[in-house]
Image (tube, grey):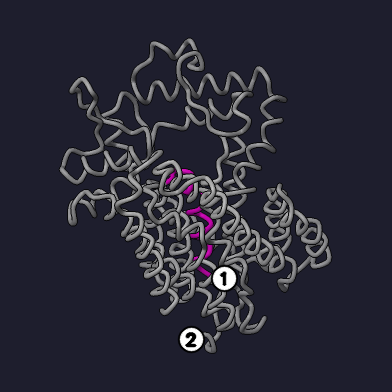
Amino acid sequence: MYLALSALVLRGVVVAWARDRFPPADDGSFYQVVATRIAHGQGYTWHWPDGAVTYAAHYPVGYPALIGAAYALFGSSPSVAMSLNAVIGALSVFALHGLLARRATRAGALLGAALLAFHPGFVMYTPALMTEGVAAELLVVALALALWTQDRAGSGGLLLLGLLCGGLALLRPQLLLMSPILGACAVSGAFWRRARAAIGVVLVSVLACLPWTLRNCQKMDHCAFVSANGGWNLLIGSLPNSQGSWLPIENESVPPPCRAVFGEVEKDRCFGRAGLGNIRRAPLAFLRLVPQKLSVTFDYFGAAGHYLHTSNWRAFDESRKVALGVVETLWVRLILLLAIVQAALAHGPRRVTRLTVSALSLPFVFLRSAWPGYLGFVLAVSLLGSALPRRPALFVTACLVLGTAATHTLFFGAGRYGLVCAALLCAAAVNEEGLASSSVVEGTPSGSGA
């Protein structure tokens, strides 16, 4: 509780400092406008300079709807969104400490929660009207809910978990891939029980998104599950001159077949077809981009410094951006080191192989290119095999890192996308078997952890 309060106070101080200095920037500018329109009952629509108002679905609806609800209650100032970000950050610290307290030593639980509470990337990203920090922190809450459900063996918990996973999908659609993983962690016992829970959570998650999908089918030019930017991202990720990062699609970079396409969803589909065409024509060139994409995603997050500098470079100049980046990178690399060590030393099969993989991964913690270290962590965790149910934080974190790597291998990379993994890595950095290696059997804690 004290760490959660400390996290809230620290983030609150950052909000007080930032509220009048840092207006919405990058995607946050769009979210601010749309959230304000939602708060005023105008829905997810866009007001064009010529006076036309159109329905939109380019970006996911989850975050603008979330802060739009807060704006409806407290006004449309960006400081309200910043404050909501601070509360979610503190909630994630509380959830992380709670889930570790039943699976680790007291010192281990405090360490994991402290790594998240004082994480410079998340603390300084609090003023950002962006989805990555909120998504990362809500994934911790989802894991805590899954393990709480497992401890109580209740179907109500599975329903809540499915709704939360649906909310995460509306926030960042690719996180729908995490719903079966979290569902499998929400029960203990035989494989079929875990599989049934995973399927149930996926179904609830999809049903939670269905009203928005139906809205898109009715209001947009074509149906879209959550958002209409996957084609854009695929096209950017297939451009050799992108170097694995974001590039604007404008002027000559717009594919000729798409230049006369104006429907939002149809344009996205057109861009997607163009991206697939680029991949088919030059598959080796596309594959050569993969290391660059993984590098810009995992080597250096830097989302907080980039946002603050973009929002107001006078108040947060290049030197401050670099300084924050150094502190954040040191913090992140420490967490990655601890997570790799946990994967290596966990009780379970193939220990020699895991030690070898981890030993080969650890040097990347100290190098500029850290992304092989993240993939080595995933491989080491996967070697636990049948012991994975006893290490749910390691399992879920490895799945998230793998899913993030796969997603941005296909699309394009950015440090803020890697930040989504950073909160769960704080959980993976702690020995979940700290109470005793026998205290958890198939994910069920003994009475000593109560």
Under circle 2, the secondary element is: loop
Q: Is residue 176 magenta?
A: yes
Q: Nearer the viewer, mark 1 or mark 2?
A: 2
Above/below status of 27 relative to 262: below
Q: Position of residue 40 (x, y in %)?
A: 16, 43
Q: Position of residue 113 (x, y in %)?
A: 51, 72
Q: Nearer the viewer, residue 71 or 255?
A: 71
Farthest-out residue, bottom: 448
Q: Which residue is mark 2?
A: 450
Above/below status of 236 relative to 215: above
Is residue 59 found left or right of 150 in the rendered image?
A: left
* Quadrant assignment, res 391: bottom right
Q: Earlier in the sequence, mark 1 or mark 2?
A: 1
Q: Nearer the viewer, residue 102 or 49?
A: 49
Residue shown at 37% from the left, 52% from the top: 167
Under circle 1, the secondary element is: loop
Residue shown at 67% from the left, 53% from the top: 374
Kindly check if marks 1 and 2 are in contact, taking CB atoms under 8 A apart as contact: no
- Identified by mark 2, the residue type is Ala
Q: Which residue is mark 1?
A: 189
* Quadrant assignment, res 424: bottom right
Farthest-out residue, left: 41
Is residue 49 found left or right of 18 in the rendered image?
A: left
Q: Main secondary structure of the magenta part?
A: helix
Residue shown at 51% from the left, 54% from the top: 180
Residue shown at 64% from the left, 48% from the top: 299
Mark 1 residue crowding within 10 angstroms, few (<14) / some (14–19) / many (20+) = few
- Identified by mark 1, the residue type is Gly
Residue numbers of the magenta segment:
172-189
Above/below status of 142 relative to 65: below
Above/below status of 221 relative to 7: above
Mark 2 residue crowding within 10 angstroms, few (<14) / some (14–19) / many (20+) = few
